[in-house]
Image (tube, rainbow, N blue to C red):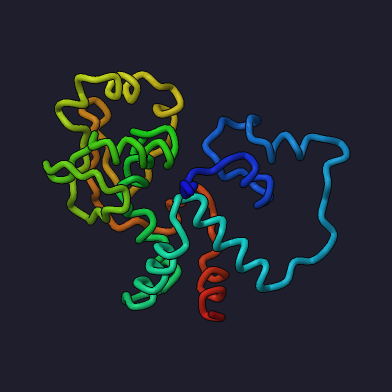
């Protein structure tokens, strides 16, 4: 069975907030809110349920399977600093996420696909592993071969990609499809809020 790592509108509705990359007003959860008789749950969710939901939300956003996500949590707990902040830094440092955040991919799922197809270089070397961890000082760029393909035209002409804001921890050279990692990802740079405290509490129960 194929493992699904992309976000659908059903996921957004289930989580109660927009997580997918569809334009504003196009996501199912937003349309549902506009319905006059939209269902509003009245039963209070348990602490465990709230923690589980937040963990699932983070997994869906970054397209990470359970075992890999647990490994990130374990690694974050062994690093210096706040575990929750370390976790987000690890997730944001994935190559597929970096490609997305630079505006080279329409969604994280799309970015994961084009990374897997070998379109990008890290420090001049082709990397086709979406989970590859980039570090401060690394350079991520579209390969010379891919710059001659439709991929380059898409990145340069797509209005949605052009309008996406770039986080402070990367420096973008759009014309050359190049991004420099100039700092460590910070929680303030997240485009979707994730309550990491709930995630850490969820795994501390297990």
Left or right: 10, with 176 as reference point: right
Total marks drawn? 0
Residue 126 x, y percent position in the rendering:
16, 41
In the picture shown, does residue 3 fall above or below 85? Answer: above
Pick the front one: 2 or 78: 2
* Residue shown at the point (57%, 70%) measured from the top left: 198
Most distant residue in the front direction:
1
In the picture shown, does residue 60 fall above or below 75? Answer: above
* Residue shown at the point (37%, 60%) measured from the top left: 89
Most distant residue in the left direction:
124
Residue 162 x, y percent position in the rendering:
39, 27
Residue 86 makes an appearance in the image: no
* Residue shown at the point (32%, 22%) measured from the top left: 156
Residue 195 x, y percent position in the rendering:
55, 63
* Residue shown at the point (37%, 46%) measured from the top left: 97
Residue 46 x, y percent position in the rendering:
73, 71
In the picture shown, does residue 115 fall above or below 78? Answer: above
Which quadrant of the view contains residue 111? top left
Pick the front one: 116 or 99: 116
Residue 182 makes an appearance in the image: yes
């Amino acid at each position: 069975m194929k493992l699904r790592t992309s976000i659908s509108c059903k996921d957004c509705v289930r989580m109660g907030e927009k997580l997918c990359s569809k334009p504003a007003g196009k996501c199912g959860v937003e349309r549902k809110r506009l319905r006059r008789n939209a269902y509003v749950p009245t039963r209070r969710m348990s602490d465990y349920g709230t923690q589980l939901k937040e963990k699932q939300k983070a997994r869906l956003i970054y397209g990470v399977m359970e075992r890999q996500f647990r490994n990130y949590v374990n690694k974050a707990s062994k690093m210096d600093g706040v575990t929750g902040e370390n976790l987000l830094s690890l997730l944001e440092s994935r190559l597929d996420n970096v490609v997305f955040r630079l505006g080279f991919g329409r969604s994280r799922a799309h970015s994961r696909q084009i990374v897997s197809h070998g379109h990008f270089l890290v420090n001049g070397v082709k990397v086709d592993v979406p989970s590859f961890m980039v570090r401060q000082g690394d350079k991520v760029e579209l390969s010379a071969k891919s710059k001659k393909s439709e991929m380059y035209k898409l990145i340069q002409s797509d209005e949605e990609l052009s309008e996406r804001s770039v986080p402070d921890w990367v420096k973008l050279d759009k014309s050359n499809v190049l991004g420099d990692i100039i700092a460590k990802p910070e929680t303030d740079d997240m485009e979707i809020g994730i309550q990491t405290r709930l995630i850490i509490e969820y795994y501390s129960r297990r």
